Image (cartoon, rainbow, N blue to C red):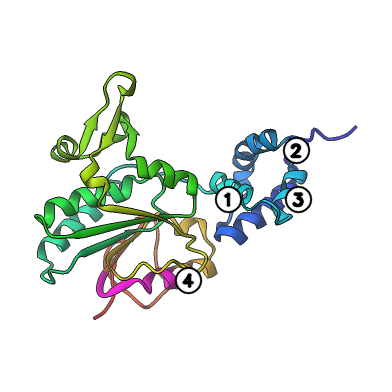
């Protein structure tokens, strides 16, 4: 009796594991099989292919780069919220207030997902720098989440950790058909540049940054990929700049380019 074509076999799952590792450096464990099955099922229906094996062959054919990007979008995990791991934002405020360079202050949110992290960064900088120029760059491998990030439009419940003064100053409450949502003010949105970038490949020329956030991303990489990604990212950190990673992450055996100055916070020597 033939297998149900919409059942993801172990062989097909292995193919998609290799696909996302090659595309993004992400290691999917066997626990993610149901996630892969659920997320890709909609593409099988949309493309009217009969099985996961046929869909994988479509991705491998080289004839449809748009579909490849759609698959990458669906298989990259995008979990984030405003002011996640708040101690990093306290640090950012102190650094910005005490910086005396008078140059444009630049912060990079790598793997920014739907944009909550770069908008949180921009709120802090707008207050701490008191009118001084700054720029926030947010990058992600997923074009789908970058489209959402650029809108700055979120469900209201996502605002629970935004400090009240920031909420009042930088967030517009939805009315009518937009009730239950919030919109980041245009002035703040204009301070952020969202760029498509794959951390596992050559990065776009973005210049140097005073602070880089690379948080809760390395947990999806193996050791070799972590080393390569961190080296690529740190090439964009100014001497004396700060590098923030997730509280559950570590740079042990990953790099010696930066020195730890606090839990999950590192500094690049001058």
Viewport quadrant of the C terminus: bottom left
| Mark 3, secondary structure of its residue | helix
> Is the residue marked by circle 2 packed among few (<14), some (14-19), or many (20+) residues within 10 Å?
some
Q: Which residue is mark 4?
A: 227
* Chain part drawn in magenta: 230-241
> Is the residue marked by circle 1 packed among few (<14), some (14-19), or many (20+) residues within 10 Å?
some
Q: Which residue is mark 2?
A: 49
Q: Considering depth in this image, is 64 or 257 the residue closer to the camera?
A: 64
Q: Is 197 placed left or right of 7 in the picture?
A: left
Say which quarter of the image contains residue 164. Answer: top left
Q: Position of residue 76 (x, y in %)?
A: 52, 49
Q: Is residue 164 above or below residue 190?
A: above
Of marks 4 and 1, which one's residue comes earlier in the chain?
Answer: 1
Q: Position of residue 148 (x, y in %)?
A: 41, 41
Q: Find the distance from the CA under tag 2 to the CA under tag 4.
A: 38 Å
Q: Considering depth in this image, is 260 or 196 the residue closer to the camera?
A: 196
Decide: marks 3, 1 in contact (CB < 8 A)? no
Decide: marks 4, 3 in contact (CB < 8 A)? no
Q: Which residue is mark 1?
A: 69
Decide: marks 1, 2 in contact (CB < 8 A)? no
Q: Is 74 placed left or right of 239 in the picture?
A: right
What residue occupies the far top of the structure in this picture?
A: 176
| Mark 4, secondary structure of its residue | helix
Decide: marks 4, 1 in contact (CB < 8 A)? no
Residue drawn where x is 28% and y is 35% of the image? 183
Of marks 2 and 3, which one's residue comes earlier in the chain?
Answer: 2
């Amino acid at each position: 009796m033939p297998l149900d074509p919409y059942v993801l076999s172990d062989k097909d799952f292995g193919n998609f594991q290799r696909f996302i590792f090659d595309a993004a450096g992400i290691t999917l464990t066997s626990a993610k099989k149901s996630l892969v099955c659920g997320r890709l099922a909609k593409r099988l229906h949309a493309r009217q292919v009969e099985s996961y094996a046929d869909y994988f062959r479509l991705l491998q054919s080289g004839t449809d780069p748009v579909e490849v990007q759609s698959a990458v979008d669906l298989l990259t995990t995008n979990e984030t919220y405003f002011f996640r791991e708040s101690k990093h934002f306290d640090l950012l405020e102190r650094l910005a207030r005490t910086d005396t360079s008078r140059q444009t202050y630049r912060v990079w949110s790598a793997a920014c997902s739907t944009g909550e992290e770069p908008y949180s960064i921009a709120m802090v900088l707008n207050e701490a720098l008191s009118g001084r120029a700054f720029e926030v760059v947010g990058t992600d491998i997923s074009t789908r989440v970058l489209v959402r990030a650029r809108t700055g439009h979120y469900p209201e419940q996502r605002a629970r950790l935004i400090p009240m003064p920031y909420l009042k100053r930088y967030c517009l409450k939805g009315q009518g058909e937009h009730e239950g949502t919030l919109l980041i003010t245009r002035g703040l949105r204009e301070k952020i540049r969202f760029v498509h970038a794959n951390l596992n490949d050559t990065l776009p020329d973005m210049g140097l940054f005073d602070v880089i956030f690379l948080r809760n991303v390395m947990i999806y990489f193996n050791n070799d990929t972590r080393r390569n990604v961190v080296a690529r990212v740190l090439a964009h950190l100014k001497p004396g700049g700060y590098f923030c990673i997730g509280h559950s992450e570590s740079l042990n055996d990953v790099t010696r380019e930066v020195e730890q100055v606090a839990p999950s916070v590192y500094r690049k020597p001058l």
